Image (spheres, rainbow, N blue to C red):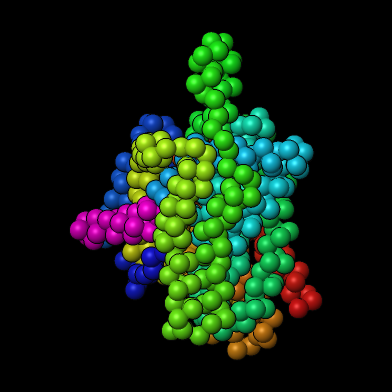
């Protein structure tokens, strides 16, 4: 992930910065929802409006957007591409069918959202949110389709597991930065983070999904169509026996092989995280694990391995493997541009200095330290759209107060900041657009599901932090 640099100072007074942010967000929403303008174009125009109203020179506004666009594309573009290749091989080989059939066969429909929340949490423990999402999307889509459930009912629990782990549990970059800035104990923060994350995931995932699926009842998008789906469609069309025979399944890779391949990038990244915590910097073992566990390298290795375990393992020849890989890329072109443009909009907000302005508003208040930490992160998250920016800024603001806190309270301070950094993802967050495009939702539907889910994570995370503060 690329580093994020905050503006040194606000570009204008609050009388211009706040209207600038609101105007940019409003323009994006109106263009997309009312005028049906493509989100990529809407985000670009919204970025320009923010810069102009905030008083940034046009050249600086364009530079900010281009920097954010480029950094986001560089940070997640290749990961999305590798994830799409991996997912297509998983689907085309029958490996996804194997996982889906196992999950559905061993989990009743009633407990399926809980199983997906657990899967999301396990995948999300060592991974960035974006990487976990691109790896889980094929499974989420196929489970929803095969179980004939709304994509929201299945997807929200998995996203809750991913997001809560990303914001609350090290070794994710946000919590690690806060731990370093506040001089918190890593092991204690990790343990308390898991204690907070588990009930938070339960509330924001399976419990919230029961209601969200009623508000937004959307079937799974037509992504990752597998051989089983094609045969079912052929039968429904009344296709002749010869046509159905052509869709005869290849031999599926076994469930253990499929599971090990899916978990390979998770294990590589977890190995890097453990090495960074336990081994001395510069050692040969740590260097090897650090290189293998870099997200780009881990996913690249996973794709190469999948070519053999999924591709050759299911009887696909070289042409079939090449065709599967090539077919995975065109569908992600639109989402990739939208996500990158979301990064450009976020960077434009950051460069106006609105994050610094929000910080100055609240740092001298007399609130509870834990609530104040959460509130600072919330306001900066809403203003800039970045959980990492919110975490870094809030940790810097609260650092002088740590001298009055004991070790347990300092760890809880890290978690309060992490919870606040996840509050209400909306149009200035690249993750908002990633979820919207993958799940095939409208902006309004995404706000009713994903954005509110993030808010539930944030608020419930704060509540559990405050409860732990009574006993820690």
Q: Say which residue appears at 71% left-offset and 60% top-offset.
A: 198
Q: Say which residue appears at 46% left-offset and 37% top-offset.
A: 316
Percent across and percent down for residue 427 are 45, 48
Q: Nearer the viewer, residue 424 or 320?
A: 320
Q: Say which residue appears at 46% left-offset and 84% top-offset.
A: 283
Vertical relation: 1 (above or below) 283? above
Q: What residue range appears in magenta? A: 57-79
Left or right side of 165 for 431: left
Vertical relation: 329 (above or below) 269? above
Vertical relation: 139 (above or below) 22? above
Q: Nearer the viewer, residue 167 or 273?
A: 273
**What is the residue that sits farthest to the right in this orientation?**
471
Helix, strand or loop for the magenta stretch, by majority: helix
Vertical relation: 363 (above or below) 347? below
Quadrant of the rendering where the N terminus is positioned: bottom left
Percent across and percent down for residue 347 are 35, 59
Looking at the image, can residue 273 be seen?
yes
Q: How many marks?
A: 0
**What is the residue that sits farthest to the left in this orientation?**
59
Percent across and percent down for residue 269 are 52, 65
Quadrant of the rendered image containing residue 179:
bottom right
Q: Nearer the viewer, residue 43 or 88?
A: 88
Percent across and percent down for residue 307 are 45, 47
Q: Say which residue appears at 43% left-offset and 70% top-offset.
A: 291
Magenta-drawn stretch contains 309: no
């Amino acid at each position: 992930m690329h580093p994020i640099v905050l503006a040194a100072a606000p570009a204008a007074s609050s009388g211009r910065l706040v209207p600038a942010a609101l105007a940019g967000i409003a323009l994006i929403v109106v263009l997309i929802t009312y005028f049906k303008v493509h989100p990529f174009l809407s985000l670009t125009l919204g970025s320009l409006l923010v810069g102009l109203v905030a008083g940034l020179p046009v050249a600086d506004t364009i530079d900010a957007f281009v920097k954010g666009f480029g950094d986001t594309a560089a940070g997640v573009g290749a990961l999305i591409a590798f994830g799409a290749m991996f997912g297509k091989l998983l689907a085309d080989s029958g490996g996804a069918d194997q996982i889906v059939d196992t999950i559905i066969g061993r989990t009743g429909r009633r407990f399926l959202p809980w199983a997906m929340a657990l899967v999301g949490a396990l995948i999300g423990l060592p991974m960035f949110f974006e990487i976990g999402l691109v790896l889980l999307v094929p499974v989420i889509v196929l489970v929803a389709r095969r179980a004939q459930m709304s994509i929201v009912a299945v997807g929200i629990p998995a996203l809750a597991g991913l997001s809560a782990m990303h914001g609350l549990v090290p070794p994710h970059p946000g919590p690690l930065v806060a731990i370093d800035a506040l001089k918190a104990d890593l092991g204690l923060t990790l343990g308390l983070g898991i204690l907070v994350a588990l009930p938070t995931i339960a509330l924001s995932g399976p419990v919230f999904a029961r209601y969200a699926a009623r508000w937004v009842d959307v079937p799974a998008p037509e992504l990752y169509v597998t051989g089983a789906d094609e045969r079912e469609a052929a039968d429904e069309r009344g296709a002749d026996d010869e046509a159905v025979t052509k869709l005869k399944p290849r031999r599926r890779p076994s469930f253990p092989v499929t599971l090990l391949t899916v978990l390979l990038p998770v294990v590589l990244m977890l190995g890097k995280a453990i090495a960074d915590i336990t081994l001395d910097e510069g050692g040969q073992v740590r260097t090897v694990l650090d290189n293998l566990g870099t997200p780009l390298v881990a996913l690249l290795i996973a794709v190469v391995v999948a070519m053999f375990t999924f591709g050759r393992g299911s009887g696909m020849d070289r042409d079939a493997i090449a065709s599967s890989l090539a077919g995975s890329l065109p569908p992600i072109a639109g989402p990739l541009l939208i996500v990158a443009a979301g990064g450009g909009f976020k960077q434009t907000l950051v460069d106006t200095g609105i994050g610094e302005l929000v910080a100055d508003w609240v740092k001298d208040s007399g609130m509870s330290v834990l609530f104040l930490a959460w509130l600072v992160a919330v306001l900066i998250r809403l203003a800039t759209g970045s959980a990492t920016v919110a975490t870094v800024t809030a940790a810097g603001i609260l650092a002088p107060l740590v001298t009055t806190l004991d070790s347990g309270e300092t760890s809880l301070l890290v978690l309060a900041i992490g919870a606040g950094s996840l509050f209400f993802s909306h149009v200035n967050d690249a993750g908002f657009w990633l979820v919207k495009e993958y799940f095939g939702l409208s902006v309004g539907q995404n706000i009713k599901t994903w954005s509110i889910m993030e808010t539930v994570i944030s608020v419930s995370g704060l509540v559990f932090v405050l409860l732990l503060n009574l006993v820690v």
